[in-house]
Image: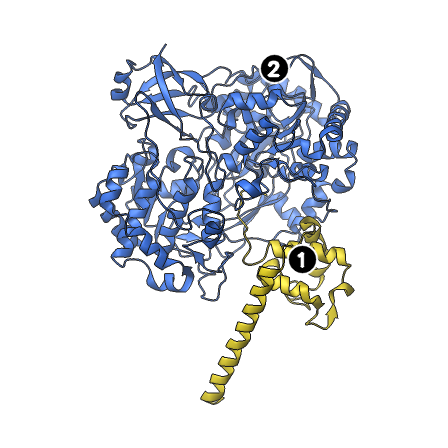
Chain colours: A blue, B yellow
């Protein structure tokens, strides 16, 4: 009898059926006969932080997930999501075996099939599209995962230039802005900073990791002064020393006015600027116009406070940071706003200093050298070279790509392969994404659950969960980087496969097997061969993480001979490259549009219980926030006749959703707020099904002009009691 | 070294740098981006060049960041290896050289390399 079926049977015997039983096991309330107890280190997948965990496995069942203190990034902490991850394995509603659609798309009729049939059918449909439209007629989209590399490689080996990833729905603008200024994206040494400014970033509520806890602790102990700018009184605002309900979309005015004060008063780090930066004179000239009094009119933050904060910030430097934030898909000028942040950080000389911004240290992994393929013949369908010539081409620009696919320009794209992504909830303007789905001849999805988008697929490949599979070994870069291993802690409970097996199954049938002629073990052997360990793989299997000795290091780039990876070799306050591409070479302020009469700006946010749109069906997490509401200021609510608890319709030019109103003083009267990740339409997401509303249904399509990043705070909505 | 010798040395050094800058600038302006296969170039670079060009090895460490775009273009225009003593074609065929050149130029020290998350 295969162990996987033994595990499943034993699980059902012990726990009874379904989620209730699984919950009991995880909570430790259910008594089970104790068999062999093992503690297996592995790596979490519930959010981008990738903490190290130790799975406690008894009698073939995961009893609990604990933090792994050997990882300095995650230390002795595992958040709510990390703890709840084990329910992915025992979720009775997860994808259990390959499926082929048996009815109309979205009808929910499926046929369980063998892996061979799923592979054969998919390869045949992809080949048909390739034959008719060329390899560029197949789109490959994915979100971040250790095994994403295999999926992307299959798309490229197939010959498609159209690989699109998640960054332009998340942090492409911050990545590009810091890359164009410093040649790299640094980490922020929050643990050692004495002065932190967070604008729009909500670390105390949206991402609870050890460095968040560090900041909370140092803020509460008054070691770190925290200034928060946010239209909402978030948890971060509540823990800050100062909170300013900044007028939405004007953060850049605040930053430019800080630069005005710092430069006009000679508070910048003159030696650092002289040695490492170029374009200071042009910057100084530009910011002359951005006085604190001007910024007060834009931001609604008093000029005296801007002056004081600028002085305090420069006094605290280099242990002072203007935190970049994570999701930066906000406004159409987000890239330039992030550039202004980067420049502010640069001129106070916090670069590569303790408590400042630190370039990520790296650990070199070896590579399994597989045979490379020919370049695709066609250009990208999103025309990156023309539209976003400075952006990361390998990531694509999701919203522009969707526009062009819908227009069939410059050529038709008729098949869609999707890995671990739910575009129906991840992209603004759900109706447009649905039109994109409708115009596809074929769609296949690799996922662990039946997401809203997977619901419309023609073929569904069930992937093993992160606790059931061996993934590529990865380096988590940072101030103190580590190498982590994700290894299976239990055998797959159902008939599922890891990503590489799925990719190889398809590659064999598409005649591309020569590019995937290796095992995951060979891949990982090659990765670790240069680590300074006697038996690196054995070490990682035992510890889950390799941490180089010595701790964080600072100052490696603080040598006037150091060449930054920029055009000039210096930190570029002024960017010739931006000018050549037709953009402002310095951050020039553009005021945002205000809401028209009777409308409100929709702002979005995250809670640390949920990752993107894909963990609201987890019962432990759903208990924390069972549905999303519309947060609205009482004055604004009164103006549209809405009382606390009323059901309201929230509508924009592209759609409408219904939510219950939550009246609160914790938001400006010109904004309303809703939590991302709700309003699921897939009946297989039983717990999350039809709870709350999806922001994707009402967000309008807009993007940042330089990076192509989605601009998700540019939608004005109407509120109506229903 | 006397002061005047030092001065002449510095001046001649500066002149050499100026010539190099002019040369590389001219190369940069006049030479189009190579149109080889970057993925294959990376593969050949790692398989062939990295045999000797790693830290502590005979050829010393070489990475794409070792030179600027113009310097890589100038290097491949010259087509010489091992301090100018050997033709590059002795190391690998022309088609592979073009691929390696494309990889190195696209990832040179002054190239546009926006970072992303994940791989």
Taking depth in this image into account, of B49 and A5 the one nearest to the observer is B49
In the displayed structure image, the side of residue B88 where residue A255 appears, left or right: left
Numbered label attached to residue B101: 1
Residue ID for mark 2: A106
Q: Which residue lies most toward the left here?
A: A304
Question: Residue A493: horizontal and vertical position, in percent?
Answer: 66, 25
Question: Residue A73: horizontal and vertical position, in percent?
Answer: 48, 45
Q: Residue at x 39, y 58 (%)?
A: A279
Circle 1: element type: helix
Quadrant in which the N terminus of chain A appears: top right
Q: In the figure, residue A97 lies in which quadrant?
A: top right
Q: How many marks?
A: 2
Q: Nearer the viewer, mark 2 or mark 1?
A: 1
Q: Residues within 10 Å of mark 1 (few under 14, many from 20)?
A: many
Circles 2, 1 touching at the beta carbon (< 8 Å): no
Chain ID at mark 2: A
Question: Residue B84: horizontal and vertical position, in percent?
Answer: 69, 72
């Amino acid at each position: 009898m295969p162990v996987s079926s033994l595990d499943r049977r034993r699980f059902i015997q012990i726990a009874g059926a379904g989620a209730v039983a699984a919950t009991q096991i995880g909570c430790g309330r259910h008594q089970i006969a104790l068999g062999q107890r093992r503690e297996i280190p592995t790596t979490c997948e519930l959010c981008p932080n990738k903490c190290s965990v130790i799975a406690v496995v008894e009698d073939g069942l995961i009893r609990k997930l604990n933090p792994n203190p050997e990882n300095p990034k995650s230390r002795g902490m595992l958040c709510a999501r990390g703890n709840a991850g084990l329910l992915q394995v025992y979720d009775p509603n997860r994808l259990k075996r390959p499926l082929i659609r048996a009815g109309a798309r979205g009808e929910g009729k499926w046929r369980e099939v063998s892996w061979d049939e799923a592979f054969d059918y998919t390869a045949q449909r992809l080949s048909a599209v390739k034959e008719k439209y060329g390899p560029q007629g197949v789109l490959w989209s994915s979100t971040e995962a250790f095994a994403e590399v295999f999926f992307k490689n299959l798309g490229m080996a197939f010959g498609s230039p159209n690989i699109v990833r998640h960054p332009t729905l998340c942090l492409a603008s911050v990545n590009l802005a810091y890359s164009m200024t410093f040649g790299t994206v640094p980490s922020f040494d929050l643990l050692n900073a004495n002065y932190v400014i967070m604008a729009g970033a909500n670390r105390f509520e949206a991402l609870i990791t050890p460095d968040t806890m560090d900041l909370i602790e140092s803020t509460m102990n008054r070691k770190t002064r925290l200034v928060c700018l946010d239209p909402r009184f978030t948890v971060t605002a509540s823990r800050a020393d100062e909170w300013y309900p900044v007028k939405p979309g004007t953060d850049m005015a605040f930053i430019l006015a800080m630069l005005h004060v710092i430069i006009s008063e000679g508070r910048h780090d003159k030696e650092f600027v002289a040695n490492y930066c170029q374009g200071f004179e042009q910057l100084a000239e530009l910011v002359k116009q951005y006085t604190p009094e001007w910024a007060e009119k834009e931001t609604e933050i008093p000029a005296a406070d801007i002056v004081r904060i600028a002085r305090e910030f420069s006094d605290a430097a280099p242990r002072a940071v203007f935190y970049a934030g994570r999701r930066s898909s906000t406004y159409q000028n987000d890239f330039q706003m992030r550039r202004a942040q980067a420049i502010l950080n640069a001129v106070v000389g916090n670069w590569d200093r303790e408590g400042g911004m630190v370039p990520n240290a790296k650990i070199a992994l070896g590579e399994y050298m597989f045979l490379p393929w020919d370049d695709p013949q066609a250009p990208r369908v999103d025309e990156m070279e023309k539209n976003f010539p400075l952006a990361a081409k390998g990531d694509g620009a999701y919203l522009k790509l969707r526009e062009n696919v819908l227009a069939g320009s410059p050529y038709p794209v008729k098949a869609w392969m999707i890995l671990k992504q739910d575009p129906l909830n991840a992209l603004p303007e759900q109706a447009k994404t649905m039109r994109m789905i409708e115009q596809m001849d074929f769609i296949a999805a690799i996922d662990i659950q039946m997401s809203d988008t997977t619901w419309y697929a023609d073929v569904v490949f069930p992937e093993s969960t992160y606790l059931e599979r061996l993934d590529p070994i990865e380096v988590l870069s940072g101030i103190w980087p580590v190498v982590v291993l994700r290894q299976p802690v239990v055998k797959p409970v159902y008939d599922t496969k890891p990503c590489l097996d799925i990719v190889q199954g398809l590659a064999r049938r598409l005649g591309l097997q020569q590019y995937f002629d290796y095992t995951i073990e060979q891949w990982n052997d090659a990765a670790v061969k240069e680590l300074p360990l006697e038996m690196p793989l054995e070490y990682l299997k035992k510890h889950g993480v390799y941490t180089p000795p010595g701790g964080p290091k600072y100052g490696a780039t603080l040598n006037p001979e150091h060449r930054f990876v920029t055009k000039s070799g210096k930190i570029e306050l002024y960017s010739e490259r931006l000018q050549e591409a037709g953009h402002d070479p310095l951050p020039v302020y553009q005021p945002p549009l205000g809401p028209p009469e009777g409308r409100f700006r929709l702002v979005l946010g995250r809670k640390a219980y949920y990752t993107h749109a894909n963990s609201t069906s987890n019962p432990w997490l759903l208990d924390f926030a069972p549905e999303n509401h519309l947060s609205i200021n009482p004055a604004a609510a009164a103006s549209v006749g809405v009382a606390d608890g009323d059901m309201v319709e929230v509508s924009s030019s592209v759609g409408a959703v219904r939510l219950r109103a939550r009246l609160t003083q914790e938001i400006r009267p010109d904004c309303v707020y809703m939590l991302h990740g709700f309003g699921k339409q897939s009946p297989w997401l039983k717990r999350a099904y039809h709870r709350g509303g999806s922001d994707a249904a009402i967000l309008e399509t807009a993007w940042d002009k330089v990076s192509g990043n989605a601009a998700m705070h540019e939608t004005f909505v109407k509120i109506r009691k229903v | 070294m006397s002061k005047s010798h030092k001065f002449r040395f510095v001046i001649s050094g500066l002149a050499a740098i100026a010539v190099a800058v002019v040369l590389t600038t001219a190369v940069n302006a006049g030479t189009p981006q190579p149109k080889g296969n970057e993925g294959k170039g990376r593969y050949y670079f790692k398989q062939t060049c990295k045999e000797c060009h790693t830290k502590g090895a005979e050829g010393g460490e070489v990475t794409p960041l070792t030179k600027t775009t113009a310097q890589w273009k100038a290097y491949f225009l010259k087509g010489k290896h091992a301090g100018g003593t050997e033709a590059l074609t002795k190391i690998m065929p022309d088609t592979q050289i073009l691929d390696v050149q494309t990889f190195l130029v696209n990832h040179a020290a002054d190239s546009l390399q926006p970072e992303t998350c994940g791989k």
